[in-house]
Image (cartoon, rainbow, N blue to C red):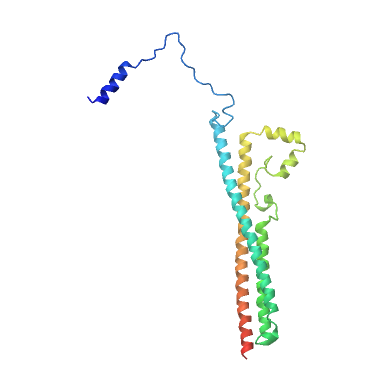
Amino acid sequence: MTRQARSRQRWRLIRPRRVHAPDEARPAEVARPPGAEAAGAPSGHPADDELRERIATARWHTVRYDSLRASLTTRASFIVSVNAVVVAGVALLLAQSPAKDIAGGRIAFAAASLGAASSLFFSALSIQRAMGALIGRRKWRALYGEVPSTSDFYQHSDTLRKFETYASFRTAFQSESLQRQLDSAVLNLWVVMRTHSYRYGFLRKAITMLGISISVFVVSSIFVLTLRVLKQLL
């Protein structure tokens, strides 16, 4: 036996042990403060805990789709700005391509004007589609075709129609069950998803129209520049 093992055995033999007397009270367990469950601890009701988890999950998805909608709005604003630059470029192109300054005379000028008009047309379509991605112009209940169950505290028009006074609103809000809260969260998530999909369709169309407008503008600019060079050479 090593010296370290003998030291441990000697310590176990000489260490005093506490022996509780029969009438000695053992230390009591620390009682949980009242309201601990309400502060975030499990409530003890599996059904309520499951509802809270579903509400939290719906909220997470809703926040995610709100972020996507915010980025969609930023991209739609960018498309409108780019279209403004294209329109300014078309105006400059027409100002720099009079019939007397390009080869081909009036026929060439008419062709250049047709290209500029086409670019303006597609740019206007792009702006219109981008506005559809920015602003909803129709009510969502009529837009999506399917009318979900109303929620007392989701759509402000439904809420104000049902609760005309603050007292009735406060009473209903404070007494709302977890199941009703889950219904509101699910309704909110469904509307957010459909709204994002609807507006994203407008964004894709706006990008397509913007691409066509830029392409026509570039071709028209090259055409006018070539005719101006030919005019100088002839």
Q: In this view, does 128 lie above or below 182?
A: below
Give left or right: position of 53 versus 85.
left
Residue at the (67%, 51%) spot, across then down: 140
Please report the residue visible at 65 percent of the width from the left and 70 percent of the height from the top: 86
Q: Where is residue 189 in the image (x, y as percent from the top left)?
A: 60, 46
Q: Nearer the viewer, residue 205 or 89?
A: 89
Q: Residue furthest bottom?
A: 234
Task: Give the percent coordinates (x, y) of residue 212.
Answer: 61, 70
Q: Which residue is drawn at 60% across and 66% down?
A: 208
Foreground: 47 or 15?
15
Q: Residue at x 54, y 35 (%)?
A: 50
- In the image, 86 versus 208, the foreground residue is 86
Establish if 9 lies above or below 89: above
From this view, report whether residue 193 is shown above or below residue 93. Answer: above
- Name the quadrant containing residue 43: top right
Q: Outermost residue toward the top?
A: 23
Please determine whether, in this image, residue 230 is positioned above or below residue 18.
below
Q: In which quarter of the image is residue 148?
A: top right
The x and y percentages for residue 12 are 31, 19
